[in-house]
């Protein structure tokens, strides 16, 4: 496949990743949001294959892509879906910041990310021009979700989206990072979400709710 065609496909993937950011910000249905984040993880798994320089070891690229697909696209979304079913919750009813303001803030973040990334000096300037902008946009979306949602599942989704942005940014350094470091990062993410899933289960069992504001009722 020609380099131009690969760059075009990568551009489409970047655009879809940003569109999923907006979808998650606008969705009150947790099941739809989990599926969207799973789709975003699957799309991110394609990027190492599309962006890898030819001199990079094939096994390195395949391991990174397969690891991202298994952890981000399958394992973590399955765990979040399990936590949602166990807690019998399906919607984020009253977020701290409404859905329309969240979309406006998300749009501003995307605009600033594209403007800032155009002037940012990079260690590998030949990388795709949308890579850094997509990374910063996705990190911003994840931060918005973490601070603007009350349900624990939504906040874990925000953490996962934020980490997806970090993963995209990390592709800038894939030429220099040993694959064991990348595998360690994916395992850390899996462990973190696993622990969060257990915490979500216990929050619901104790308070009969997944609203994290209930935690303010705890006393020493």
Image (cartoon, helix red, strand yellow):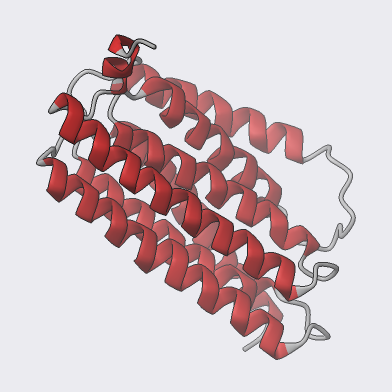
Residue 157 appears left or right of 13: left
The quadrant in which residue 4 appears is bottom right
Q: Can residue 109 be seen at all in this image of the molecule? A: yes
Residue 122 appears left or right of 133: right
Q: Is residue 207 above or below residue 180?
A: above
Q: Residue at x 12, y 28 (%)?
A: 208
Taking depth in this image into account, of 4 and 33 the one nearest to the observer is 33
Q: Position of residue 5 (x, y in %)?
A: 61, 77
Taking depth in this image into account, of 65 and 216 the one nearest to the observer is 216
Q: Can residue 6 be seen at all in this image of the molecule? A: no
Q: Position of residue 216 (x, y in %)?
A: 34, 11
Q: Residue at x 54, y 24 (%)?
A: 108
Residue 31 appears left or right of 219: left
Number of residue marks: 0
Q: Residue at x 54, y 51 (%)?
A: 164
The quadrant in which residue 14 appears is bottom right
Which quadrant would the C terminus be assigned to in this image?
A: top left
Q: Is residue 100 above or below residue 124?
A: above
Q: Position of residue 173 (x, y in %)?
A: 79, 61
Which quadrant would the N terminus be assigned to in this image?
A: bottom right
Q: Residue at x 25, y 32 (%)?
A: 203
Q: Position of residue 15 (x, y in %)?
A: 50, 53
- Residue furthest left as drawn: 88
The quadrant in which residue 41 appears is bottom left
């Amino acid at each position: 496949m020609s380099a131009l065609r690969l760059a075009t496909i990568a551009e489409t993937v970047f655009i879809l990743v940003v569109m999923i950011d907006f979808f998650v910000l606008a969705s009150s249905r947790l099941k739809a949001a989990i599926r969207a984040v799973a789709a975003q993880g699957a799309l991110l798994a394609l990027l190492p294959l599309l962006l890898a320089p030819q001199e990079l070891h094939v096994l390195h690229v395949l391991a990174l892509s397969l690891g991202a697909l298994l952890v981000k696209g399958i394992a973590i979304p399955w765990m979040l879906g399990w936590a949602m079913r166990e807690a019998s919750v399906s919607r984020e009813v009253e977020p701290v910041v409404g859905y329309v303001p969240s979309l406006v803030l998300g749009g501003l973040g995307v605009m600033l990310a594209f403007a800032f990334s155009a002037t940012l000096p990079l260690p590998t300037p030949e990388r795709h021009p949308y890579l850094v902008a997509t990374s910063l946009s996705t990190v911003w979306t994840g931060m918005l979700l973490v601070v603007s949602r009350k349900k624990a599942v939504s906040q874990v989704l925000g953490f996962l989206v934020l980490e997806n942005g970090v993963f995209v940014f990390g592709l800038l350094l894939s030429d220099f990072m040993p694959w064991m470091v990348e595998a360690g990062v994916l395992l850390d993410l899996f462990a973190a979400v696993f622990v969060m899933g257990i915490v979500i289960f216990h929050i619901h069992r104790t308070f009969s709710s997944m609203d994290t504001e209930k935690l303010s009722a705890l006393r020493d």
